[in-house]
Image: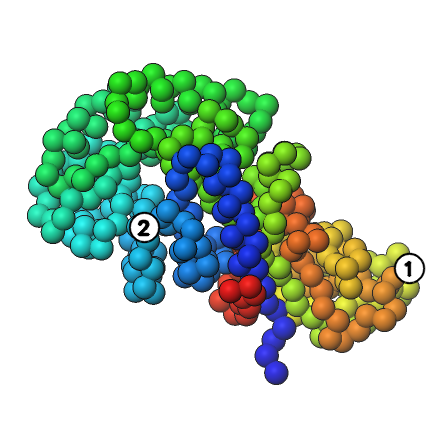
Amino acid sequence: MSRAAKITVDLDAIRHNYRLARSLNPAGNAVAIIKANGYGHGAVEVAKALEAEADAFGVACIEEGVELVEAGINKPVLLLEGFFEVSELEYISKHGMWCAIHSLDQIEQIAQAKLSQPIRIWLKMDSGMHRLGIHPTDYQQAYNRLMALDNVADVILMSHFASADELDKTTTEEQLASFDQYAEGIDAPVSLANSAGLLAWNDARRDWLRPGLMLYGATPFSEAQENADKLIPAMTLTSEVIAVREVQAGDCVGYAGNFCADKPSRIGTVALGYADGYPRHAGTGTPVLINGQRSRIVGRVSMDMLAVDLTDFPDAGVGTEIEFWGKNLTAAEIAPHCGTIPYTLFTGITRRVHKRYINR
């Protein structure tokens, strides 16, 4: 019998979330972002589930792109960080990958490369995030240089938002204005909207959308938002109770004894810990579900196990399933208890947690 820690991935939920993204700009196209192993959901399985509908897939780097190619995925693959070495360009060209470009040096490397076929380029402007991208004052020059190259098929204009998930800030409006100012007069398709931009900022929904986190059913916002409220969580993390302890008032549980019972209690030990990707920083009081009802983690999360409060669940015992996040207890609710965000919860799941796919 295998260890019970597992994630269940609902592929229909991912399809629903992709369709929601498309519905927000029906005339546009949408790159399904499946970097970081599909945000922990499994890049190949997600790609197969969306291949009939997605216009393209987005990954961080060529290694992630190669995985899709070798799995037989035929839709275009966009490398969001572009290429790291000139030697990658021929593979990108041969397999019809699309490549983000964020520096003038990269453009000159493309100019000098010998390629089997031209590449579609996504030209990134640094409109205010100051992480990657061409400086706005160099953007027109960069575009013109690319369009003069035989190695370039065409160019899509892009940028990335720093604070689209913070709805009370003006940062996104400022980035939009900067992008439009410095891209003015360039006749090319535009891609600006990540998940937060797509869900909440109408002017960000240009020719190409880039839904990422929202594909997996998690909201990027800290408050309710009309479109985000329509998302369906795709990942459910569960495990089982493997032991039960009856403890008395004053008894302490786990490493460092940082939880001590204030009354007689039943404590369940569950086969899940930080080596599985459940955050060590999840403290006493972090909610869990037992038979659909709320309980809590108690004590410190250890490498392979953690403890939950079974006091109000007299029928719970060895073998009882515990849900840590999913459709009924969202990752967005759990994340603040752990001092993190849903992205890290999803991508932190490790390989020893079994994956189960439903609605293939």
Label 2 secondary element: strand
Q: Residue at x 57, y 48 (%)?
A: 217
Front residue (pair 208, 299): 208
Q: Are marks 1 and 2 in contact (CB under 8 Å)?
A: no
In the rendering, which numbered label is found on residue 263?
1
Q: Residue at x 53, y 59 (%)?
A: 11
Q: Position of residue 335 (x, y in %)?
A: 63, 47
* In this view, 86 is above or below 136: below
Q: Residue at x 55, y 22 (%)?
A: 169
Q: Quadrant of the N terminus?
A: bottom right
**Residue type, mark 1 in image:** Lys
Q: Position of residue 242 (x, y in %)?
A: 71, 75
Is 50 left or right of 346, judged from the image as shown? left
Front residue (pair 37, 52): 52
**Residue type, mark 2 in image:** Val
Q: Earlier in the sequence, mark 1 or mark 2?
A: 2
Whole-number angstrom distance, CA of label 1 to CA of label 2: 57 Å
Residue holding disc 2: 77
